[in-house]
């Protein structure tokens, strides 16, 4: 059996360093906002090439705190891809803002820059490009539109640790970026964790306060803040794993190449490969019109898969006020996408077995 994801196996190469990190924190006697968080923030900011990194409790909070810190008037609009992960959209509503859907490019599944301008109104304040599946959005034209209309850009980089766009790191391509270190991400903690990267000093200060009750000085509160702190234990674990990220992304890329050259089933649509070296292959997503039949076929042959994601946000009960929206590209994608196993712990043999199985399939 090849499970879609085996976190125990993924963390196996890091066990020794994780154990050391745990001991260090245990014996330090300091568990919240200390040296470990500061160290990881410095390391991750350096990795992204940004001036600041602020550790927070999870990826949803990272996005929400940026939008709150920007302090837009209530009911301002934020442009989001209509095939976003639910957390990207939740951050907008949790910050009392209105999501405005823009369809993805059907070839890349990413926010289509050509469709943004038509969605801008005089209440639009920000664009939230999601670097879905590990590939950066086409940020050049997105920045042009943002500059033309005076909009800020919040990258959702939760699936893009180490991805680049024209050689520049994700997380340093907009005004701020939200990160998640949920265990299954390319850089994953052993629990919930998140961060914000930015080059904006004022924004960074404000978010540091917002994550800690709105306080930058003990018992003095300038904002109505959250409790959204990255804890020392998770920060220490992330510092232990960060040095391997580039190598692990390289392994993902090698396996992605195997899939791309091996899968020869004419009805299976492969992901775009034109940015193969800049993409970090968080997920390897194929498309097949009768997805669920293929999924069952693979499962019966011992191959676990997943669907990212089965229901578009505007069709979720939570967003029932948008149920009438017609977003045909998103709706089609959600019915056809299938994620194959792809992570650094997979062997070539396992991936070749998956390829052969897909090539045998016909319905
Ligand atoms: C994982 C993820 C998030 C949310 O991260 P959490 O840490 O689970 O809150 C947000 N956006 C995208 C695209 C994600 O993949």
Image: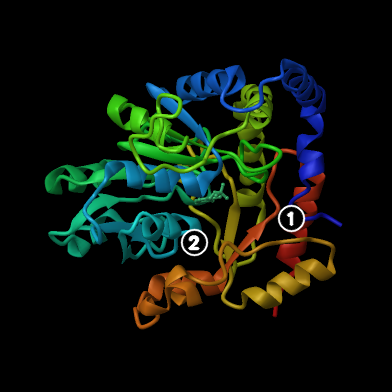
Image quadrant containing the N terminus: bottom right
Q: Is mark 1 within 8 Å of ligand 1?
A: no
The residue positioned 69% from the left and 72% from the top of the image is 294
Can residue 289 be seen by looking at this rendering? Answer: yes
- Local SS, label 1: loop
The residue positioned 81% from the left and 24% from the top of the image is 19
Q: In the shown orientation, is residue 21 left or right of residue 165?
A: right
Q: Is mark 2 within 8 Å of ligand 1?
A: no
Seen from the viewer's position, the closer of residues 275 and 112 is 112
- Residues at marks 2 and 1, CA–CA distance in whole angstroms: 21 Å
Q: Which residue is mark 2?
A: 86
Location of residue 242 in the rendering, given as x and y in whole percent from the top left corner: 62, 26
- Dot 2, how many residues are within 10 Å of its Cα: few (below 14), some (14-19), or many (20+)? some
Q: Which mark is residue 4?
A: 1
Q: In the shown orientation, is residue 101 left or right of residue 44?
A: left
- Dot 1, how many residues are within 10 Å of its Cα: few (below 14), some (14-19), or many (20+)? some
């Amino acid at each position: 059996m090849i499970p879609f994801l085996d976190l125990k196996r993924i963390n196996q190469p890091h066990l020794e360093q994780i154990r050391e990190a745990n001991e260090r924190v245990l014996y330090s006697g300091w568990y919240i906002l200390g040296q470990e968080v500061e160290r990881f923030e410095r390391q991750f900011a350096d990795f992204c090439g940004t001036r600041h990194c602020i550790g927070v409790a999870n990826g949803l909070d990272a996005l929400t705190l940026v939008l709150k810190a920007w302090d837009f008037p209530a009911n301002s609009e934020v442009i989001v891809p209509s095939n976003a992960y639910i957390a990207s959209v939740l951050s907008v509503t949790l910050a009392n803002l209105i999501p405005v859907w823009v369809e993805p490019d059907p070839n890349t599944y990413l926010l289509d820059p050509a469709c943004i301008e038509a969605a801008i109104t005089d209440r639009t304040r920000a664009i939230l490009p999601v670097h879905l599946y590990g590939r950066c959005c086409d940020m050049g034209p997105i920045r042009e539109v943002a500059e033309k209309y005076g909009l800020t850009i919040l990258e959702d980089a939760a699936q893009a640790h180490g991805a680049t766009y024209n050689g520049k790191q994700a997380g340093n391509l907009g005004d701020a970026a939200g990160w998640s270190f949920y265990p299954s991400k390319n850089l994953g903690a052993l629990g919930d964790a998140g961060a914000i990267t930015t080059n904006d000093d004022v924004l960074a200060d404000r978010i540091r306060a917002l994550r800690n009750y709105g306080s930058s000085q003990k018992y003095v509160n300038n904002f109505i803040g959250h409790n959204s702190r990255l804890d020392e234990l998770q920060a220490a674990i992330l510092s232990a794993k960060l040095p391997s990220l580039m190598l692990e992304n390289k392994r993902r890329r090698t396996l992605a190449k195997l899939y791309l050259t091996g899968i020869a089933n004419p009805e299976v649509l492969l992901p775009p490969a034109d940015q193969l070296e800049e993409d970090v292959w968080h997920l390897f997503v194929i498309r097949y019109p009768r997805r669920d039949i293929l999924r069952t076929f693979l499962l019966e042959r011992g191959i676990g898969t997943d669907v990212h994601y089965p229901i578009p946000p505007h069709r979720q009960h939570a967003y029932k006020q948008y149920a009438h929206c017609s977003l045909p590209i998103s709706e089609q994608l959600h019915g056809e996408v299938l994620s194959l196993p792809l992570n650094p712990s997979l062997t070539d043999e396992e991936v070749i077995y998956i390829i052969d199985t897909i090539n045998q399939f016909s319905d």
